[in-house]
Amino acid sequence: MAKSIKISTDDVTYVTLPGSQGEFSADGEAIEDTILGQSFTSMDTGLTSWSVSSDAIWKGAAGYIANLMSVGTPTAATGEATTLVSGKTYQIDATAKEIWDRTATVTVYDNAVDHTADVANVDYLFGQVTFDTGYSVTGPITVDVEYFPIAVIGCAQSYTLTMTANTIDNTCFNTAQANGGRRTYDAGLRTVSFEIQGVYSPTEDWKTEVQARTEIIIEVDPAGDGLSVARGFFKLATQSQSGAVGALEEESLTFNLYVPTESTNPEVEIPFGWKHEAGTTLNAGCRMILDSWEQELNTYYMNYLPSGTPGQSPLDGVSGQFVVTDASLSGDLSSMNVFQASMQGTGAFTVI
């Protein structure tokens, strides 16, 4: 059987990550217990931990088809229809108008009456409004906004969307005693950056944007079909360019995520996120990795199966819960779009 790494939300239904390789690591904490009269250093093993890493290929999505976009000049739109997403969240129907200018006034109407004051927050990246839990919606819901059109960023030849997270070690005596001395973790602070390399274009003066400290919304559409896209607020951190005589001038841009203060009216819901539509070609396991990272979960499960199937004899697989520490994505002209998934195990693993 072929090696596989599988992901699950409930420890029942598992989906295989589309990776080409993977690694499992179990580590013990070395604790010195040398005592008087011994002529050798003695080391005991304290708390243990484990982790799994794997790549995950976006099947059918070569790197060159990725759309790397930034926003242009905002345009006013009034009376835009919305559709209920879930709960009390509504999304604008016009896909081309779902990136909104957070510095402009957003007005939300319920049955043609201004109920902006009853809106808890706005997702300016994906064109959604969420009402307060205590408000009863009548419908229909419409919005007046200023939306951003999008355009391709420069002449890119490769990109990396870095999405990482710290872990919070919440191990204590009682949990370690109950799980056999394994460390436990929660998801911590997340970091996002975006880097592209390509051909320098003098018509796009990015070097001045570093000094201007301009906030910009960036969209990454790896499959180029709009069915799985990432968007966020960024500021350009570095711009560099170089080239030999008689050769193309090359440029590198690095953007760091900028988290707006919630001083807009209504408040900003998220600074960065992914949106997946029906029909997306992104593997369900990859979506679970992204969901776990976005929602800061430690409740998803992973099966690491060197032989491809649990229950083989001898047992050589492991299963356990994890925290995502890396879900970064990259692509270029000569490769596929590929995720790098790193999962820090939390608590004990089971041999399967």
Image (tube, rainbow, N blue to C red):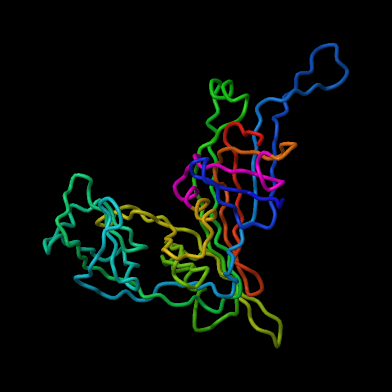
**Would residue 142 appear left or right of 166 to someone viewing this image?**
left
Residue farthest bottom in this picture: 246
Asked if 243 appears above or below 292 in the picture, the reply is below
Report how many numbered discs are placed on residues in the image.
Answer: 0
Whether 235 is among the magenta residues is no
Q: Nearer the viewer, residue 193 or 279?
A: 279
Q: Is residue 76 left or right of residue 318?
A: left
Determine the image quadrant of residue 129.
bottom left
Residue 319 point in image, percent of width and height: 61, 38
Q: 178 above or below 147? A: above
* Quarter-of-image position of residue 37: top right
What percent of the width, then of the height, locates residue 12?
52, 41
Please state the horizontal and vertical placement of residue 34, each as a whole percent of the image: 79, 18
Q: Nearer the viewer, residue 115 or 233?
A: 115
**Residue most toward the right?**
39
User: Does the magenta segment cover residue 304?
Assistant: yes
Quadrant placement of the C terminus: top right
Residue at image x 49%, y 80%?
204
Please provide percent x and percent y for residue 210: 49, 68
Q: Quadrant of residue 133?
A: top left
Q: Which residue is painted at 52% across and 40% down in the image?
A: 11
The residue at 57%/69% (across/down) is 61
Q: What segment carries the magenta color? A: 291-311
Residue 37 placement, left or right of 91: right
State whether residue 55 is above or below residue 313.
below
